[in-house]
Image: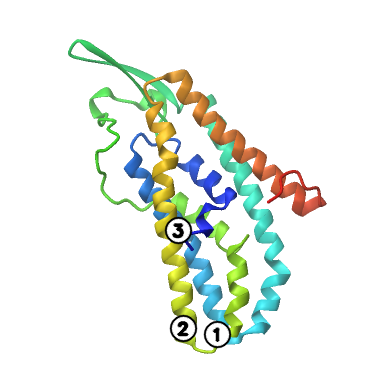
Amino acid sequence: GLKHSTDADHVVAVSTLTAKYQNVWQGIWVGASWGLGHTTPLLIVGIAVLAFKGALLDRYNDVSTWFELGVGIMLVFLGGKVFWNIRKGQFHVHRHVHGDEQHLHIHGSHVAEQHSPHKETLHSLLRPTRPKFRLTSFFVGMVHGLAGSAAVMLVLLPRIESMWVGFAYLALFGVGTVLSMAIITIFLSLPFVLSVGVGTLHRTVVSAAGAISLIIGFALIAEISVGVSIIPF
């Protein structure tokens, strides 16, 4: 589970989700929500595989390719959404004066016209934030859950005779993905947070995340739909 979160498509998808946050600690809840979403379908299908063994696993193998295709489509959507937000002005600059100092802030969580300087929170790198469940991250994790290398662990389940041992195996894998992605997302947030005061740099970092998501998404779609390997996954 700890290793699984480092898959390229996982990291890229979550990086697009963290682009709009200005605090690295908010990334923890993005990553943890993704991990919970990733674990949910695996836990459901995994328990069913433990109960029905190879019969259900064969049915899953018949449709597993469609889950991979869904990941590619989702990555294209997430990357496109980043550029759409930039074009619509949702990543925008505000200039504020605090005493004798001027500060530039980049925002991506609301429309520019709706911003109120008086409601703005401090953009602090180390200021802890309250735990908050991220529904979008949860759904993105669910799409990833039954695709890619996570599906490989389901193959081992029919060999486990004890239902409890199998459930513990699934639970530990899930805990590993939640912890790993929460930690990884802290580091994914750093480029976005550290570039907040520099408008051009921040826009470049955000655009890079969106572009990589588009590239990997289209590469996955091409490999699955027409068998053309653009990127060795």
Q: Nearer the viewer, residue 132 or 158?
A: 158
Taking the spot 47% from the left edge, 68% from the top edge, the residue there is 173
First-in-chain label (1 vs 3): 3
Residue density around tag 3, few if under 14, some if 14–19, many if 20 or more, within 10 Å: many
Q: Which residue is mark 2?
A: 165
Residue density around tag 2, few if under 14, some if 14–19, many if 20 or more, within 10 Å: few
Q: Residue farthest to the top? A: 100
First-in-chain label (3 vs 2): 3
Measured in 3D between alpha carbons, the distance from the residue under mark 3 to the one under mark 2, in whole angstroms, is 21 Å
Q: Residue farthest to the bottom? A: 161
First-in-chain label (1 vs 2): 1
Mark 2: amino acid = Val
Q: Which residue is mark 1?
A: 160
Are the two marked residues, 1 and 2, in contact with CB atoms closer than 8 angstroms?
A: yes
Q: Position of residue 156 (x, y in %)?
A: 60, 77
Are the two marked residues, 3 and 2, in contact with CB atoms closer than 8 angstroms?
A: no
Q: Position of residue 31 (x, y in %)?
A: 42, 51
Q: SS for tag 1?
A: loop
Mark 3: amino acid = Gly
Measured in 3D between alpha carbons, the distance from the residue under mark 1 to the one under mark 3, in whole angstroms, is 24 Å
Q: Which residue is mark 3?
A: 35
Q: SS for tag 2?
A: helix
Residue density around tag 1, few if under 14, some if 14–19, many if 20 or more, within 10 Å: some
Mark 1: amino acid = Ile
Taking the spot 55% from the left edge, 44% from the top edge, the residue there is 12
